[in-house]
Image (tube, helix red, strand yellow):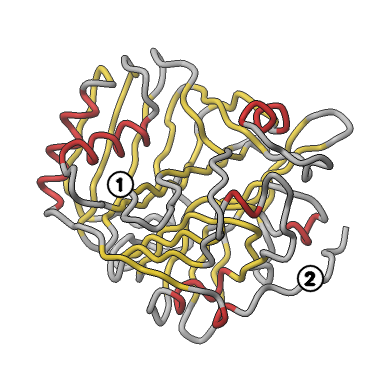
Amino acid sequence: MAAVQFPALDSAALPVEHAPLSQPPLKYIAAVLEAGLKENFAEASVTVVECPDLREAPWGLAGSGLGGETRVLDIGGVPYLMPSVTRDKLYDMKDYPKLTGLKEGLVIGAGAAPWPFLDRCAEMMPNLFVKEDGSIDQETRISRTHDEDGSFSTQKLPTEETRNSLLGNLFLCSGSPGPVLRIHCKRRTGPKNLVTCMRETLAEAWPADSLGLGGVFNMVTGKAKFHVMPDFSPCPIKSDAEVNNWLKFYEMSAPLTVLSVLVSRDPGLDLRVEHSHGWGDNNQGGHYHYDTTPEEVEYLGYYNTAQVCYRVDRPPVHKGLG
């Protein structure tokens, strides 16, 4: 199907707020995270290492590193999706580096796919490098459902398709090499998923500060619960129960690569404090919830801290759904 013609909003006209984020030394964050993860996993280690080339398998990022000028970007929000969709909330990811003061940069994270591309709602795994000359290295994937049989599929976006509908939670950086957090966990023994455990551990250790982390993790073994958004609901969605009835849930199998953004504490910008989307073989992809095989699961990931949080086009009302 040809993409429906629908232009992205003028990024220069979008309201932008920002707040500094705390950046304790990585060695202290590593020690705190390792202690917290050991309460939720039988084995856990967090170390500071030089970032490997994340363009290589199994990571598949559009840039090699997570270093340089680091940012968290929260654009739009769930109130533009529900109770009823605001279709004109369509942004352009190639403008995100400039919106956050970068000449060029890696953009990764979680968001809603450009609905005009499929003429329907879908999940998106933003993963692109925007160069200073405006050219794009595109590795973004989208996941959609199929109404006829309830199945799902995942595909890469073409280079020229850089739109992002409704909402996005992104980590941006210059893509430079440098020190990062290497996180390795096996066999979940506690109730929290990997990302929530990390976020709550940081919030407890630095109760007065907001720390932002972004990166990528690979589920090496095990299975996990994911959801994929179907097409927009024809009726307003007014409760979390209706949200869950609308979403389509699936169990997906390792290996899975997941792009992840978290903020330990909202610094007053009405942020979504964690959001993770990923993909895998056999057309797998969508929104990560938690692993469903705790005895088998193994995670390996790389994260870096963000210097600043940018809040773009904040919805005027926070509905609290989803």
Residue drawn at (42%, 38%) of the image: 218
Q: Position of residue 109 (x, y in %)?
A: 48, 53
Res 301 quadrant in image: top left
Q: Position of residue 59 (x, y in %)?
A: 44, 48
Residue drawn at (43%, 52%) of the image: 271
Marked residue nearer the N-terminal end (2 or 1): 2
Of the pair 90 and 126, the residue shown nearer to us: 90
Which circle marks residue 31 in the picture? none
Instruction: Determine whether 221 is above or below 287 in the image.
Output: above
Instruction: Determine whether 185 is above or below 238 in the image.
Output: above
**Callout 2: few (<14), some (14-19), or many (20+) C-alpha neighbours within 10 Å?**
some
Of all residues shown, which one is farthest toward the bottom?
Answer: 133
Distance of label 2 from label 1 (alpha carbons): 35 Å
Instruction: Determine whether 297 is above or below 84 in the image.
Output: above
Amino acid under label 2? Answer: Phe
Local secondary structure at mark 1: loop
Residue drawn at (41%, 16%) of the image: 294
Q: Is residue 197 left or right of residue 289?
A: left
Instruction: Determine whether 7 is above or below 60 in the image.
Output: below
Of the pair 314 and 159, the residue shown nearer to us: 314
Q: Looking at the image, how many numbered discs can be counted on the residues?
A: 2
Q: Which residue is mark 2?
A: 6
Q: Which residue is mark 1?
A: 265
**Callout 1: few (<14), some (14-19), or many (20+) C-alpha neighbours within 10 Å?**
many
Amino acid under label 1? Answer: Arg
Of the pair 108 and 261, the residue shown nearer to us: 261
Q: Are marks 2 and 1 in contact (CB under 8 Å)?
A: no
Q: Is residue 300 left or right of residue 85?
A: left
Q: Position of residue 200 (x, y in %)?
A: 28, 35
